Every structure is written in structure tokens, then in C-alpha cells.
Image (cartoon, helix red, strand yellow):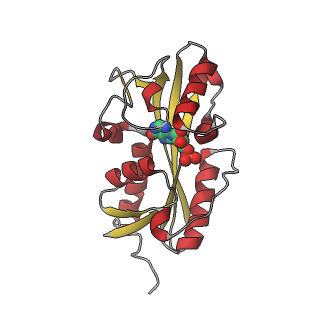
Amino acid sequence: MKELVLASNNKHKLEEIQNILKDYIILSLEDIGFKEEIEETGDTFKENSLIKARRVAEFSKKITIADDSGLCIDLLDGAPGVYSARYSTSGTDEDNLQKVLKNLNGKESTAKYVCVISLIDLEKREYTFTGECPGKIITKKQGIGGFGYDPIFFIESLKKTFAEISFEEKNKISHRKIALDKLLNYLILSQGGDLEKDKVK
Ligand code: IMP
């Protein structure tokens, strides 16, 4: 099977990505012995995704993907956005979610999850693929599945939050799934699914 390094230590992302890219072995940063903390200094998901992918590709010398993602809430002018993982002082999922509820002050708001997957191939060529999933932020947590802001991210058509649907259901409609489908399409169209095809032996 083909290997892809994922520039992340987030086990939820890793599980979701592995579940969607079933034909690839996804190696985590732990798997490749990468211990550095990468500073996400970009102002956009795309910049941060590329920052992570570039650093890890340089280290791994393997085909590398990175996921930068987050929640953009309309009533909060797009916050927490690229700061989704570090919105509260502690940066825990629970504190981040509680800060969103506090800032919304009892109001619901339309919102979207955004995910930018970057890919760096063995010739250091860079590609990015974006996925967006619209939803609504509700005023109380519902459900125990998923991670991050999922218990308050409500999908109107399902009448459920991302924390109330199964892992498989989330992976059919999420921002991550949409971005990864674009990546898969690219891989299939350009390389017959095999990024190592053009590798110079
Ligand atoms: P990153 O690791 O810098 O890309 O930050 C991603 C952050 O966005 C996570 O820590 C979550 O707070 C949030 N996030 C991204 N995708 C999801 C998701 O699928 N469910 C819930 N929260 C998410």
C-alpha cells in the first residue's frame, strides 16, 4: 500500500483521514519520529496547512499531507477561524467550545467548518484542496461523538450535531471529507492514484 505522512499529531484527524483514505497507509508524526512544535504563523488555513506540510516533508523526505482546519462563525465575524485550536487560554476542546458559547451570549449563528489539505510530493510540488461544511452553532452541547466543536455544530438537514452522528456518517459529509475527495480525485486523475509513479529511481 502507498504511504502518506500526515503532518499532525491530532488523533481524531488521523482517524478520520485514515478512514477516508482507505487505500493509503497514513503515517503520523510519531510514526516518523518528528518531535518539533511547528508554529502556525499564517493568517489563513491555506498558509498554515502549507507551513506544516513543508516542514514535515523536508524532514520525512516522503509524500506529505497536512490538514489545517477550523470553525468560522458568522456572528463572531469568522472567529475562531485559524485560532480554533487555541481559542481559549488552555486550548482544550471543552474550554474552546465554552468560549464560543460565552461569546455568542445565548444566540445561535450560522457557521462553517473549513479544512485545507496540502500535499507535497517527492519533487516538492505543492497542492492545496479546500473543503467547507455549512452548519449552525446551537446554544447547548448535544451528543458525545466527534471532537472539538462538534457537540455545538448542528446540521440542519440531519437535525443533529456532528457529535450525534456516527463516525462513518460524519466522514461522508465533513469539510475534511470534501477536501480529501478533491485530493483523491487529483491523485487518480494525475497519477492513477500512485504519487510515486513519477519518482526518479
Ligand atoms: P489545527 O490542528 O490547527 O488545524 O486546528 C484544528 C482545530 O479546529 C481543532 O483543534 C478543532 O478545534 C477545530 N476543528 C477542525 N476540524 C474539526 C472537526 O471536524 N470537528 C471539530 N472541531 C474541528
Residue at the outermost top position:
106
Q: Position of residue 201 (x, y in %)?
A: 44, 87
Residue 124: tell me if it is visible.
no
Q: Is residue 7 left or right of residue 2?
A: right
Front residue (pair 96, 66): 96
Front residue (pair 71, 177): 71
Image point 62% across, 63% down: which residue? 36
Can you say which quadrant of the picture contains the N terminus?
bottom left
Q: Position of residue 125 (x, y in %)?
A: 56, 67
Image point 39% across, 68% down: which residue? 3
Image point 39% across, 45% down: which residue? 177
Image point 69% across, 44% down: which residue? 43
Q: Is residue 90 left or right of residue 178?
A: right
Vertical order, 57 against 76 (above or below): below
Vertical order, 91 against 105 (above or below): below
User: How many labels were placed on the picture?
Assistant: 0
Vertical order, 62 against 68 (above or below): below
Residue at the outermost front position:
90
Q: Position of residue 49 (x, y in %)?
A: 58, 53
